[in-house]
Image (spheres, grey):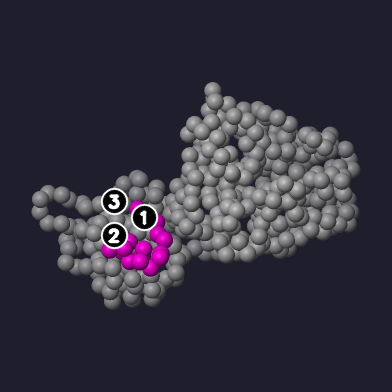
Amino acid sequence: MSFTSCYIPIGVPTFHLESAQKEFDKSVALLRGIDENVAVPQEMLLSLDKLRAFLSKVQPDLAIVQNITFANAAYMSEVLHTFDCPVLLWTLREPVIDGGRLRLNSLTGAYSAANIMRACGKRFAYVFGAPQEETTKREIAAVIAAAKLKKDIAALRLLQIGHTPEGFGFGRGLDSEMLSTFGVRLTSIEARELIDRAKGYSDEEIASYLAVAGERIRALDKTPEKNKLDFARLFKAYDTYVKENGIGAVSSRCWPDFFTSFGTPVCAVLAMLGDNGVPAACEADSYGALSMFIGQTLTGKPTFFGDPVSLDEGENTITLWHCGTAACSLAREDTGAVCDVHCNRKIGPTLDFGCKAEPKVTIFRVGREPNGSFRFFICTGEALDKPKQFNGTSIVVKTNAAAREIVESSVKNGWEPHFVVAMDDIAAELTALAEMYGIPVEAY
């Protein structure tokens, strides 16, 4: 879906228009450098008539309202009346302080705009700074990215395959909550539907899937022939259903059904989907799948999904691990995406590797509160160059905040045991997204 942001420079003509024009030109250049499709007016909007004329021509997904000079609350009232979309309020730094004339008075205008937005119950993002400042550019870019993501989330169709295992109800998605908060459409089917599909495929029908898997997974040829072929059958069943139904993310039941009813785990299939651009969480954790979608959309890379299992105060690290569902592209280059048997059930194939180093990562989770509301967990750090820590897939994150404090606090605050590791620092974008939803953040 196409995304449109628009720049709305409001003000009045009684201030220093030469200074304002310079800020206008620099602001347009900055915004076009971030989003080349941003809609901009041909001139500053220095009257309500000019503002109304411009607003009538655009239908934005994000309104960037800048006090190019002071403007009273009537200007922002027009924006709120015309659009129902996220708003970024941008205040310019006063360009000259020399004891003479106040050139812009952008900040007072921001107070007027913010006051009417609060009175109307409108949430908004806020940036203070001149267009030539690097911090200004980073903050605006984060809000634009968050607004794009919010639109992508609203278009998401998330597939929930089967039920969460006993004791894992924290991940069980509710269609009404997904839709009302995020706009996500939750589709639910039983695991046996895909198992039955898989059982019906011939060896010839799965040959291309087996070939793709063989290119990505090392030692797949050492998997017993029946398990290898049944894995390919599951891969085709999942991939076909995803494509036929426009699915953007998956949460799938895994144990015990795929061991007991099918004889082959689904772990490696979920890894294949991740590398195909479809985030896939195991143990039917639908809010985990949503977290993966958010992380993968912001970074353009698959995310790691797993449990915090180990803490090392000396290295200030937290190890996250799971049975073997990590996308193959996350594997260390020296080992590649090796496969083996499941650590508990001793049936393969599952992935078995340590993740490669990343200079910046973000541990993230969309958490569900007992009352059905949501919260975001955000923690930044780096992924270290470490081999696999346990059988399965693992990643070792050196956190920027104290690792022990993060573990103790997140346990005491009742966070779910599944987290996502996104392969970049996306804390600013996630924070901006949370503000757009009105969701509280626990950040480290």
Where does label 3 land, which residue?
130
Figure check: 18 above or below 390: below
Image check: 416 left or right of 136?
Answer: right
Viewer-side residue, 299 vs 163? 163
**Does residue 118 belong to the magenta stretch?**
yes
Determine whether label 2 and label 1 are within 8 Å by CB.
Answer: yes
The disc labelled 3 sits on which kind of residue? Answer: Ala
The quadrant in which residue 396 appears is top right
Q: Which structural element holds mark 2?
A: helix
- Horizontally, is 316 left or right of 87 in the view? right
Residue 432, magenta (yes or no): no
- The reply to whether callout 2 and callout 3 are in contact (CB within 8 Å) is no
Q: Which residue is mark 2?
A: 110
Residue 167 got which mark? Answer: none
Type of residue at label 2?
Ala
Q: Mark 1–mark 3 contact, CB under 8 Å?
A: no
- What's the CA distance linking mark 1 and mark 3? 13 Å
Image position, residue 441 (x, y; %):
49, 48
Q: CA distance from mark 2 to mark 3?
A: 14 Å
Rendered position, 207 above or below 246: above
Regarding residue 8, the answer to whether it shows in the image is no
Q: Residues within 10 Å of mark 1 (few under 14, many from 20)?
A: some
Q: Dividing the image into 4 quarters, which one contains the N terminus? A: bottom right
Q: Nearer the viewer, residue 321 or 95?
A: 321
Magenta part of the chain: 110-127
Q: Position of residue 72 (x, y in %)?
A: 25, 67
Q: For mark 1, what is the residue?
A: 126
Of the numbered discs 2 and 1, the one sitting upstream in the chain is 2
Residue 35: x and y in percent read 43, 57
